[in-house]
Every structure is written in structure tokens, then in C-alpha cells.
Image (cartoon, grey):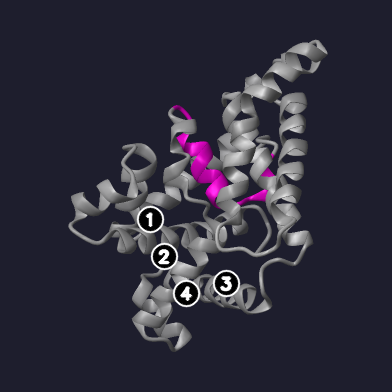
């Protein structure tokens, strides 16, 4: 395995990398702040992000086959989310709703032997489709940070971005990335057709949400909902593979 060349860099070179990648910290902090309250939150997120960036520069291993800016983004976002969780920022009601959805998907997947459709999840929860789709919208706001708006950072690393969209902490150091990518690829093939198509167009064909909506002849909001449902379905099965379910 290649050793990390960044760990041996002179202080001046590390400072150069820090300055070069610092805009990523600011960009992500503002995105995570969207819809949040707290005058000191931005400063705390920035500080957490800088710590994550410094750790990325120290721990980056080019032998993993992923670019430094991709790895840095993953570490920065992870540090910021940890900061928000430490503040108990997300309400119990939001967490409870998310847990209900994930438990429903887990139960349905075990019963059906496949990833469930949105209608099946809604019926299982005793919700109308309108109510369930609203829950999906809230889920996306809570867990997925405007992926299409930062996709320019990932021209060669769409798989890494998709893996991090699942927020799998156990693979944040990328030690299991390649094996997880193989499993993820198989599970994407098992998704309902529209969900699979949205992920394929977004992560592998490099289309943004607006472009996907045009291709599929549906609204951009609907694309977002399908994306959120696909991520939820994949999260449940990836947690199983990681021994977390």
C-alpha cells in the first residue's frame, strides 16, 4: 500500500493545501446551515470542517484510488454532521419519522425479498402517498446536502459520492470502499426501475436533478423523492452488510 505523501509535507505545503481546499469548508457549512437556526452554528461548523480538512490532509492515502478533494469533502462533511449531532440539532420528531421509514423498509425488504416501492412503504406506515412523499422530502433535507450543487468536485469519483450519501460511518476511512462498491452495485440493480434509473442518471451519467426530470418527464421534486427513496432502500441493505441492522 502506498504511504501518504501528504503526511511528510512541509508545513508551508500543508498550509497551501489548506488554503486551496478551504472554500469547500465554507461552501458545505452554508449548505448544512440552510433552514437552521443558531447564530453560532456557522462558526462551529466552520471550525469542525477545518479540523476534518486537516485530518484529511494527514490521513489521505492515494493507494485507495480516490482523489484528495473527494476524501477531504467526505471528512469535512462527517466532522460537520458530528458537530450538529452533538448539539442535538435535529428534533426528536424528525429522528422518529426517519427511524419509522427505515424500520418499515427493513421489514418490507425482509418480507418481500426485494427493495420496496414507495406505495408499499406508505401502505405499511398507514399513510397516504402525499403524506409519505412529504416525509421523503424532509428526509432528503435532513440527510442529503444538495449533492447536485457540489457534484463538480466528483467528476471522477461518483461512486464515492454515492457511498457518502448513504452516510456509512464505518467506511469513512475508505478501508472497505471497494468491497462496498461491489455490493452497492448489485443492490442498485435490485432497486425498482425508476429509483435505479434516477441513481444511474445522476451518479453515472452526470445529469443533475433538473436534467433527469426532463429526461423522465416528471417534476424535479419527484426526482428528488425517488432519489431519497433509493438512498433509504440502499441504506437499509448496506447497514445489514456492515452488521449494523
* Position of residue 171 measured from the top left corner of the image (x, y, whole percent): 66, 43
Label 4, label 3: how far apart the Cα atoms are: 8 Å
Q: Residues within 10 Å of mark 3 (few under 14, many from 20)?
A: some
Residue located at (60% from left, 32% from top): 23
* Position of residue 154 measured from the top left corner of the image (x, y, whole percent): 47, 32
Look at the picture and state if 175 lies above or below 19: below
Proximity of marks 1 and 3: CB atoms separated by less than 8 Å: no
Question: Residue at label 3?
Answer: 98
Dot 2 falls on a residue whose secondary structure is: loop
Left or right relative to 224: residue 4: right
Q: Earlier in the sequence, mark 2 or mark 1?
A: 2
Q: Earlier in the sequence, mark 4 or mark 3?
A: 3
Question: Residue at label 2?
Answer: 114
Proximity of marks 2 and 1: CB atoms separated by less than 8 Å: yes
Question: Residue at label 4?
Answer: 135
Question: Residue at label 1?
Answer: 190
Q: Earlier in the sequence, mark 1 or mark 3?
A: 3
Q: Which contiguous range is marked in magenta?
A: 156-172
Label 3, label 2: how far apart the Cα atoms are: 20 Å
Look at the picture and state if 23 lies above or below 2: below
Amino acid at each position: 500500500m502506498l504511504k501518504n505523501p501528504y503526511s511528510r509535507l512541509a508545513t508551508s505545503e500543508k498550509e497551501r493545501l489548506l488554503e486551496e481546499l478551504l472554500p469547500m469548508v465554507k461552501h458545505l457549512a452554508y449548505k448544512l446551515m440552510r433552514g437552521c437556526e443558531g447564530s453560532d452554528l456557522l462558526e462551529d461548523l466552520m471550525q469542525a470542517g477545518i479540523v476534518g480538512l486537516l485530518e484529511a490532509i494527514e490521513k489521505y492515502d492515494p493507494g485507495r484510488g480516490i482523489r484528495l478533494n473527494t476524501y477531504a469533502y467526505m471528512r469535512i462533511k462527517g466532522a460537520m454532521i458530528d458537530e450538529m449531532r452533538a448539539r442535538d440539532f435535529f428534533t426528536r420528531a424528525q429522528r422518529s419519522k426517519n427511524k419509522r421509514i427505515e424500520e418499515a423498509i427493513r421489514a418490507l425488504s425482509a418480507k418481500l425479498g426485494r427493495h420496496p416501492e414507495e406505495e408499499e412503504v406508505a401502505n405499511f406506515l398507514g399513510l397516504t402517498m402525499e403524506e409519505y412523499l412529504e416525509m421523503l422530502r424532509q428526509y432528503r433535507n435532513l440527510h442529503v446536502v444538495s449533492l447536485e450543487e457540489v457534484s463538480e468536485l466528483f467528476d471522477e469519483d461518483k461512486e464515492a459520492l454515492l457511498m457518502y450519501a448513504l452516510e456509512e460511518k464505518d467506511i469513512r476511512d475508505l478501508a472497505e470502499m471497494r468491497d462496498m462498491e461491489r455490493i452497492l452495485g448489485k443492490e442498485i440493480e435490485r432497486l425498482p426501475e425508476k429509483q435505479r434509473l434516477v441513481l444511474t442518471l445522476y451518479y453515472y451519467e452526470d445529469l443533475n436533478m433538473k436534467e433527469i426530470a426532463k429526461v423522465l418527464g416528471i417534476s424535479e421534486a419527484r426526482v428528488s423523492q425517488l432519489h431519497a427513496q433509493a438512498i433509504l432502500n440502499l441504506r437499509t441493505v448496506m447497514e445489514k452488510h456492515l452488521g449494523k441492522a
